[in-house]
Image (tube, rainbow, N blue to C red):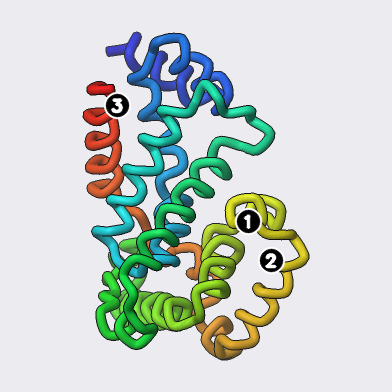
Amino acid sequence: MQTQAVTVLEQSSWSDEEIMDRVLGGQTELYELLMRRHNQKLYRAVRAVLRDDSEAEDVMQEAYVRAFQNLGRFERRASFSTWVTRIGVNEALARLKSRQRTEMDYLEECVLEGNAVGATTKNPETARADSEARELLEEAILRLPLDYRTVVMMRDVEEMTTAETAAALEVTEQLVKVRLHRARAMLRRELYARVGATGTEAFQFHATRCDRVAAAVLQRISAL
């Protein structure tokens, strides 16, 4: 048991580059470490495009499998997280185009998932207020036009840098800044003031989903 604990601790200190080298060296099971590190970021980016939880999971699996298949050709000029996010966003955009539905269709079909209540030290009224605020923020973001909500999700919710966002979306940093400025202007100022620091708690990729995506991807790559 002690040996296993040390191993887990050592693995947590490995960089993405070291893990990728080990995966390419034959330790494919370590690919799960990369997925668990970056599931939250990828989920938020993909869900911003698709606004559907189950389809977002499908796209995540596809992105991870494609990244695994092309890992040896990855030049590492960007980080792994930026690279796999770009793959996921492109796949999500392709699926979005294939639907051929109107913006209103998306709004009607959007299902907002309730978030778990906050820390147990909060009283019920505070926890309920925080949950409602997060739901309002999620709904407001999802109602933004596609180009704006993806930027807001990456920059404000996931807290990616301008450079990372630009690389993931394959646009210029200046365009990211313009879209972010316009998107923030569309959102009600009082909404951000009310939600405040809880903004980063929105669109959580919960443990059950993390386990499901990781298991599905590992099963698929084992058959490659």
* Image position of 23 (left or right of 159): left
- Residue at image position (29%, 26%) is 221
Could you give the CA–CA distance between mark 3 and mark 1, rounded to whole angstroms? 28 Å
In the image, which disc is placed on residue 106?
none
Q: Look at the picture and state if 58 lies above or below 107.
A: above
Judge by depth and name the residue closer to the eye, 149 or 120: 149
Horizontal and vertical percent for residue 205?
35, 54
Residue at horizontal 26 percent and vertical 75 percent from the top: 111
- Look at mark 2 in the image and give the residue it sits on: 176
Instruction: Return the mark for residue 165.
Output: 1
**SS of the residue under disc 1:** helix
**For the residues bearing labels 3 and 1, Cβ distance under 8 angstroms:** no
Tell me which corner region of the image, top left, top right, bottom left or bottom right, holds residue 67. Answer: top left
**Amino acid tagged 3:** Ile
Disc 2 and disc 3: Cα gap in Å? 34 Å
Q: Nearer the viewer, residue 102 or 158?
A: 102
| Residue farthest to the right, as pictured | 174
What element does badge 3 sit on?
helix
Q: x, y (%) of residue 148?
A: 57, 74
Locate the N terminus by quadrant: top left
Q: Which residue is mark 3?
A: 221
Dot 2 crowding, Cα within 10 Å, few <14, some 14–19, many 20+: many
Q: Are marks 1 and 2 in contact (CB under 8 Å)?
A: yes
Q: Earlier in the sequence, mark 1 or mark 2?
A: 1
Q: Amino acid at mark 2?
A: Val
- Does residue 129 appear in the picture of this structure? no
Compared with residue 187, is residue 224 higher up or lower down, i.e. above or below? above
Indicate which disc, 3 or 1, sits on the residue closer to the N terminus: 1
Q: Specify the quadrant of the image occupied by residue 143.
A: bottom left
Left or right of 23, for residue 167 = right
Q: Look at the numbered disc 2 and give the secondary structure of its residue.
A: helix
